Image (spheres, helix red, strand yellow):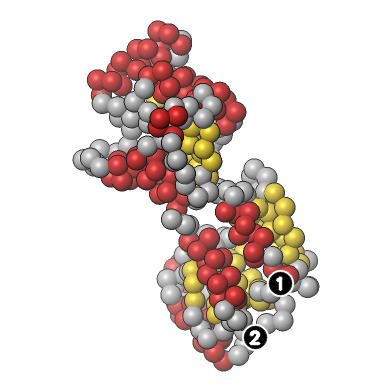
Amino acid sequence: MDNIDLVVLRTAREWREAGWAVVLGTITRTWGSAPRPVGSLVALRADGVLAGSVSGGCIEDDLVEQLRAGSLNLQRPTPLRYGVGAEEARRFGLPCGGTLELMLEPLGPQSQLDELLARLARGERVRRELDLASGAVQLAPAQAGDTLSLDEQRLVSHHGPQWRLLIIGAGPISDYLARMAQALDYGVMICDPRPEHVGDFALDGVQLTRDMPDDVVMDFKADGASAIVALTHDPKLDDLALMEALRGQAFYVGAIGSRVNQAKRRARLSEHFGLTEAELDRMHGPVGLDIGARTPPEIALSILAEMTAVRYGKQA
């Protein structure tokens, strides 16, 4: 499973490989209640086919009209603005007089699309610098806290997972949780030192480690964009991971198990590892929203639903 913008980049590459001229649009600025966030992508094929989205459909319709009229036969990156006035805002479906600005970029060999996708397939975060005069692109590793920036010479955007998820335990739930999390823009790592559980477990773009969970959590260096979920059902592994995770900065720490098992876990973490009540209260367990989930994909869905609620500060 892929996030929307990764699908856009892959589709753009497929179209170019098939011989089509392709323009890539990046949202660079928004004012008011714009439909999609800065950095979102849309790809436009020469015959008017689109991949991705920047609005509810009105702007996409206008882009197709311009494309078919030949006005988007671009030779260099070109900005395009929608919704400056109230009439345009109504026409293009921008609520509350919102405004949206796109940078339209004709793709070519200088765009380094293949190299960008190769790095993203390895789970990397990538800084992409577009020279607005030539259309040439330079790629470099992205840094924490990087945001999109635009000036008269260049557009700097960032691609790859914005959030991180560490899963303790390899199994069916982990499989679904990792796949779904990737679709929500998480870079995913799975830790399980048990050979009988790891086996040939492998997912594209997911890092697998067999080191001990407490060491992995420490090396993970969780921050406010990180989540840690323990799924092994083995106290010797889950407790070690939770001991470190609950003392860290992760915005979400969850552990699988019944309410009875959660009470026992809290007691162990308090008595044997010295965790405080405040640290223990950071643990979400039983993990996930109570939606009656029974199967691995349903449980994974419930976990991601709770993670999303916590991430946006909503009452789960």
The amino acid type of the residue labelled 2 equals Asn
At a point 25% along the width and 24% down the height, the residue shown is: 259
Badge 2 element: loop
Badge 1 element: helix
In this picture, residue 64 sits left or right of residue 306: right
Which residue is identified by label 1? 109
Q: CA distance from mark 2 to mark 1?
A: 17 Å
Give whichever of 90, 38 is nearer the camera: 38
Which residue is identified by label 2? 73
- Sequence-first disc among 2 and 1: 2
Q: In the rendered image of this protein, does residue 307 appear above or below residue 52?
A: above
Mark 1: give few (<14), some (14-19) or many (20+) Cα within 10 Å: few
Where residue 262 sits, quadrant-wise, is top left
Q: x%, y% of residue 267?
A: 35, 12
At a point 48% along the width and 69% down the height, the residue shown is: 53
Give whichever of 301, 173 is nearer the camera: 173
Where residue 316 sits, quadrant-wise, is top left
The amino acid type of the residue labelled 1 equals Pro
- Res. 81 in view: no
Q: In this view, which residue lies farthest toward the bottom?
A: 69
- Res. 301 in view: yes
Mark 2: give few (<14), some (14-19) or many (20+) Cα within 10 Å: some
Task: Identify the mark at residue 135; answer none if there is no mark.
Answer: none
At a point 62% along the width and 57% down the height, the residue shown is: 118
